[in-house]
Image: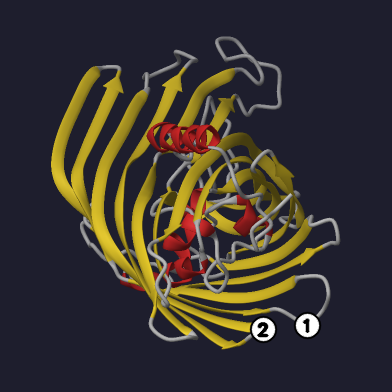
């Protein structure tokens, strides 16, 4: 079978092409947003985003290698690599485990162990697509691209049951031991998505320039509730929620330089983003019944971002690619219009990505990667991720799969305060909790040239 230089079968029929484009448009219309993730990044978006299985398997790299239409999100200058038309569409499932601990001391005030106080298991998914096409057949390549991706997923979920802490049999009029006192929940949903339109052109034999315009849109919803179940004393049940609808536009400019036949350099700069919209706050006290509902204008000002990377292709019979990339974003310049002081205390963050792809004699690639992200919310916290994946020809295209395992640990305040006394028994709680977050992600993408 005749294939393109990227290993795709060529000569797809008009029916197949129409079907694939229709599926892509349906994915564009119905693509869902992330539903859950780590607490530490729920305020302004998860840094550990997913942009296709091909990239995810190689540590999230894409600044110095071609990723089809998804290059509009990484480095639009690499769109010139496309010599026909390429469509990518994918989905990812994320299993997120959060465990919260606090120190346990004996009667001599000596540390014994970190005791688990809460455990949450959540699943969520992301999806996206990209389309790239060569325009014309002149001596200098000119290409266009479009993509839809999750740029800043906000999601996070937490729930706990508050129970009677007394270790003794109940006295007269006292609640049963381990009786359920309250159910407390917090759920943050939504994502800031980016619809990107890009163009790239060769300006010389070894230099290409590209740019993309990124329209960001989405809604962040944060809802908390505490339902009092023991009916002892005052009913303190309440629900609160706020909803921030955002939209805004920024620009990405990219450079691709072929240093020689085996080394590519990629550099991209993304401008700052002002996302504005309505911020609605609702507070409801269930007993006595009382409610407030306000809506005002607000904004998120995301800082600029710079990416740079190198891709090296050694001289051997089997095609192999090594890539190393760094992304930097000065989060200390973030501005939040929902705060009294619009300058939150954040830290500049770097994202280091390593990836390798080796193609065997049968054309099947094996991909590995590593990714390390410093956290904008906690200077002492970071995400370390190990990635792997492969691909195979399916029908008229190539199906890629990726797996990622990531872990981070940080110290955070409790989601809800604990009572200082309950029928004479106190909740012995440290003001902070050690939070361990483990994520296992599986993604699949289908890429087709036509």
Which residue extends farthest bottom?
259
Q: How crowded is mark 1: few (under 14 residues within 10 Å), some or many (20 or more)?
A: few
Relative to 405, say whether 228 is above or below.
above
What colouring method underlies this structural image?
A: secondary structure
Q: Name the element at disc 2.
A: loop
Residue drawn at point x = 36 percent, y = 51 percent: 194
Residue 148, horizontal then vertical, whole percent: 41, 48
Relative to 388, 199 lies left or right: left
Q: Which is nearer the N-term, disc 1 or disc 2?
A: 2
Separation of marks 1 and 2 at Cα, in angstroms: 8 Å
Nearer the observer, 131 or 240: 131
Residue corresponding to mark 2: 262
Q: In this view, does 288 lie to the left or right of 150?
A: left
The residue sitting at 43% across, 46% down in the picture is: 154
Q: Residue 367 carries which label?
A: none
59 or 88, nearer to the observer: 88
Q: Do the residues labelled 1 and 2 touch (CB within 8 Å)?
A: yes
Residue placed furthest toward the right: 361
State left or right for residue 272 relative to residue 61.
Answer: left
Q: Is residue 92 left or right of residue 182?
A: right
Q: Image quadrant of residue 59?
A: bottom right
From what the image shows, is residue 359 above or below residue 323?
above
Q: Which residue is drawn at 79% across and 57% down?
A: 363
Number of marks drawn: 2
Q: Position of residue 282 (x, y in %)?
A: 24, 31
- Say which residue label 1 marks: 315
Coordinates of residue 342 in the picture (x, y in percent): 23, 62
């Amino acid at each position: 079978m005749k294939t393109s230089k990227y290993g795709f079968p060529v000569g797809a029929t008009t029916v197949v092409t129409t079907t694939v484009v229709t599926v892509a448009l349906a994915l564009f219309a119905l693509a869902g947003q992330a539903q859950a993730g780590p607490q530490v990044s729920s305020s302004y978006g998860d840094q550990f985003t997913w942009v296709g299985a091909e990239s995810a398997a190689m540590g999230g790299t894409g600044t110095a290698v071609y990723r089809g239409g998804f290059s509009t999100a990484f480095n639009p200058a690499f769109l010139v690599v496309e010599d026909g038309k390429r469509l990518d569409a994918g989905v990812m499932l994320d299993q997120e485990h959060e465990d919260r601990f606090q120190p346990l001391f004996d009667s001599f005030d000596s540390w014994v162990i970190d005791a688990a106080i809460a455990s949450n298991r959540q699943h969520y998914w992301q999806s996206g697509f990209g389309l790239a096409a060569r325009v014309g057949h002149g001596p200098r390549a000119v290409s266009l691209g479009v993509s839809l991706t999750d740029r800043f997923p906000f999601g996070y979920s937490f729930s706990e049951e508050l129970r009677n802490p007394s270790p003794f049999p109940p006295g007269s009029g006292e609640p049963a031991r381990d009786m359920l006192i309250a159910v407390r929940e917090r759920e943050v949903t939504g994502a800031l998505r980016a619809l990107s339109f890009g163009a790239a052109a060769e300006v010389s034999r070894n230099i290409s320039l590209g740019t993309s315009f990124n329209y960001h849109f989405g809604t962040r919803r944060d809802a908390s509730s505490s339902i009092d179940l023991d009916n002892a004393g005052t009913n303190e049940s309440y629900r609160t929620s706020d909803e921030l609808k955002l939209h805004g536009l920024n620009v990405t400019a990219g450079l691709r330089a072929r240093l020689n036949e085996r080394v590519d350099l990629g550099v991209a700069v993304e401008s700052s983003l002002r996302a504005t919209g309505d911020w609605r706050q609702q507070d409801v006290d269930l007993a006595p019944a009382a409610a407030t509902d306000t809506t005002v204008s607000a904004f998120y000002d995301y800082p600029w971002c710079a990416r740079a990377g190198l891709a090296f292709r050694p001289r051997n019979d089997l095609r192999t690619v090594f890539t190393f990339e760094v992304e930097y974003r000065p989060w200390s310049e973030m501005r939040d219009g929902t705060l009294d002081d619009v300058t939150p205390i954040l830290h500049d963050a770097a994202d280091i990505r390593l990836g390798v792809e080796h193609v065997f004699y049968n054309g099947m690639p094996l991909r590995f990667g590593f990714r390390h992200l410093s956290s904008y919310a906690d200077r002492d916290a970071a995400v370390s991720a190990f990635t792997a994946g492969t691909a195979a020809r399916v029908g008229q295209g190539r199906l890629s799969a990726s797996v990622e395992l990531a872990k981070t640990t940080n110290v955070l305040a409790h989601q809800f305060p604990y009572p200082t006394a309950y029928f004479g028994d106190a909740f012995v709680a440290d003001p902070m909790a050690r939070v361990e977050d483990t994520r296992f992600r599986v993604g699949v993408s289908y890429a087709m040239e036509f």
